[in-house]
Amino acid sequence: MISGQARLTLTAWAATLLAACALLPLVDPPLWILQAAIVLAVQSGVGAAARRVPLARALTVAAQALVTVMLLTLLFAREHAFAGLIPGPEALRFFSALLEQGGNDVGRYAIPAPLTDGIRLMLIGGVLVIGLLVDVLAVTLRSAAPAGLPLLALYSVAAGLSDGGVDWLWFLLAAAGYLALLLTEGRDRLSQWGRVFAGTARGPGGRPAGAVAPVRTGRRIGAVALGIALVVPLGLPAMNGGLLDATGAGVGSGTGGGGTISAVNPLVSLRDSLNVEEDRQVLSVRSETANASDLYLRIVSLDDFDGTTWKPSKRSITTVPEGTFPTPAGLGTEIRRTEIGTTVSTADWYGQDWLPMPYPPSGVSVKGDWRYEPVGMTLVGDHGQNTRGLTYEVRSLEVQPTPEQLAGAPEPPPALRREYTELPESLPAVVSRTAREVTADADNAYDQAVKLQEYFTLNGGFEYDTEVDVGSGSQAIARFLRDKQGFCVHFSFAMASMARSLGIPARVAVGFAPGTPQADGTITVGLRDAHAWPELYFEGVGWTRFEPTPTRGSVPSYTVPEAPDSTLPDPARPSRATTSEPSDAPSPSESCSTERRRLGACESESPQAALPTGDDGPKWPALLAWSLTGLAALVLPLTPMLWRMRTRAVRLGAHGRSEADVAPYVLAVWEELSDTAWDHGIPPDESLTPRKAADRIVRLGHLDPAAAASVHRVADAVEQVLYAPRPRPTAGLTEDVRRVAAALRSRAGRGARLRAVFTPRSTVRVVWAVSARWSGVRERALAMRPTWRRPSTWRKPSRQQG
């Protein structure tokens, strides 16, 4: 017959596996779940064996963690480990590289992602970590209720990324596992809870028949809990995944034309797709434009700047307008414009939530579920819609303002100026100071914008460098202005921030720079064409593109003033290839050999050069070390309190209530009473009888009659155990000890109460126990030594003579 602990171990394994099923829709194929189940079973079996020995709890957890690391090494890094199981420095470096690869793969692929080695390590490793936490909490510490937190974390990760419509099924599986864990761990407690739902069971004749059956009680609790969990979320915001806030798996709330786009950061997927070894084709474009060098495909605009990074604000969305789109904000009738048509075909593997389009669009013909965000004039997928394998047509405007029109632009509306010139207080002062210095002799906002562009592209000494690690945080732009090395994200972020400091409305656009023209008239856009650029607002013209990144994209013609002393290059000769004829030169991916790519000599935009949302700091091993150090710094001061709580729970537990083992229980209760008094300033006196010791506690603790009677009842039970031939169990001893503890706390001052909780005096027993254990070990070691090597006890010779 399976023991209760073995049953609980098996239930914890099953509960973790049921919660892990929520991750199945994220990757294809889902075969990793079989490996996770086997490795998780081994991990649970090691814990069960260690508890049966029995080992101390800390050693049990350590054994499980060690076996988990060895199993992961066997699965993923056996070629880099000793004997294929023991990880060394080389294996740890391999794990680090594999985790980094997995993080890149997660950002690169749409759901369902392919099961790469990096993603498989993240999935199996994550399930094992959650499984270890559940096993420790539910089985080792015998507390199943907190085990729901790691199970919830596992489900939440899956629900936050899933774009499917069966999230309720995974929730039911995870909830069923958790309820089974509760039922297995606490049958007695569940039977008591059952009275709330069904009252006390009755036997024949109406007499009480004891507690309700645990299984029947668990079913009732499960039904109520599941009902609440399924009904309550209907009134709460949906928790859905991907980059967008969704209803079901899509965007917006409800089935009408409303909804919102959440404030997310598309730069995550942008920078993860830049540093690829092979420049894979993303889009194939055919356009009516006469100048392919100006064909930027815009995905989304970032207008919310928090001092660390730029991200899109939360915007309202609506249905895609039929026919012609509304005129872009700020575009006047006197500005020259030409409408062009563009056909875009996306790769089958490229699943982007936003639709890449030339800006500003005047009409879109696209199949699928798409919604329109009018402020940024972008289209975003609804209910899981993305660009994978899509072909669509876009009508857009080629806006051609003159430098005079931009220079003579009136002040923008106050509301727009206030929103798009907002800067955080954490922005370093060097940003605005440099902007003022660069534009000191500018006459208007247009001149200021041109001088900022010239500062980055020509006379500022900046270099386009994809290998530099500029960092992040509030000082990132300041470091970029100091080091003058970076790539498109740094240049666009810096220019937009500096423009805002000058009172020019600015935002950052993310999308693709002009691609490479082909012989058949199409334009190929690859991953390395991913780009970011600033857009500045001029009343009468609207949002206007600028290009501060050297060697990327093309300088707009309207940023070349007619003044003869302009230092900008001829826009007809952009920094990248702008001819409509196919180029004979090999692409970067073709000209870069495998050896050069391995040595890092190939030019590609490194994700390390982007501005991530976190602050500067060490990589994940150092972060893990610092986190563990911080956790130890928090836990170590609380160790006496935790040990005391654990000791109290063991002494006053439900064990030892029968006649067979009443003596150990009563003595443990007496020891707990003595230690409680000791913690409140009444040290024990081992020379006194239980009755005399009880009188001493009552006298020194100034206890009230009720508490004094409780002390004497415990002392009487101890005397019965010590002197009675057949001691009988005494009911209510636990309540007596708790009553005495409450009375001692009420009599003590605040400082004494805090000391009794956080630094209890009775914890010195740990030192005594360790000392006694060490003495015993030392004596056994001496006893095992040969007789001639044992230390002799020399006696002083007697002066008597026989």
Image (cartoon, grey):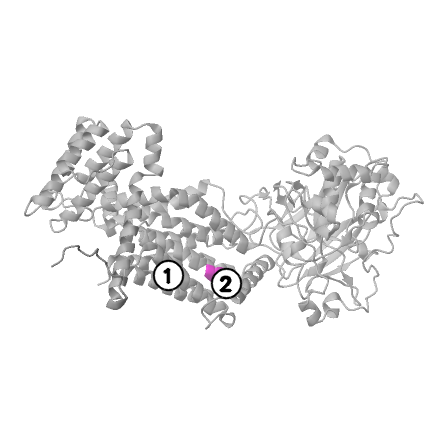
The alpha-carbon separation of the residues under discs 2 and 1 comes to 21 Å
Mark before the other along the chain sequence, 2 or 1: 1
- Percent from the top left, x then y, of residue 709? 15, 31
Residue 481 occupies quadrant: top right
- Percent from the top left, x then y, of residue 485? 74, 52
Q: Which residue is mark 1?
A: 63
Residue 600 occupies quadrant: bottom right
Q: Residues within 10 Å of mark 1 (few under 14, many from 20)?
A: some
Task: Indicate left or right for 523 with 230 as reference.
Answer: right
Residue 801 occupies quadrant: bottom left
Disc 2 marks which amino acid? Leu
Does the CB distance between marks 2 and 1 fall below 8 Å?
A: no
Reply yes or no: does residue 456 show up in magenta.
no
The secondary structure making up most of the magenta span is helix
Q: Give the residue at x 44% y 52%.
A: 155
Name above or below for residue 785 compared with residue 700.
below
Name above or below for residue 268 compared with residue 415.
below
Name above or below for residue 713 compared with residue 726.
above
Q: Quadrant of the N terminus?
A: bottom left
Q: Give the residue at x 28% y 31%.
A: 745
Foreground of the two, 747 or 288: 747
Q: Which residue is mark 2?
A: 121
Q: Which residues are magenta?
A: 121-125
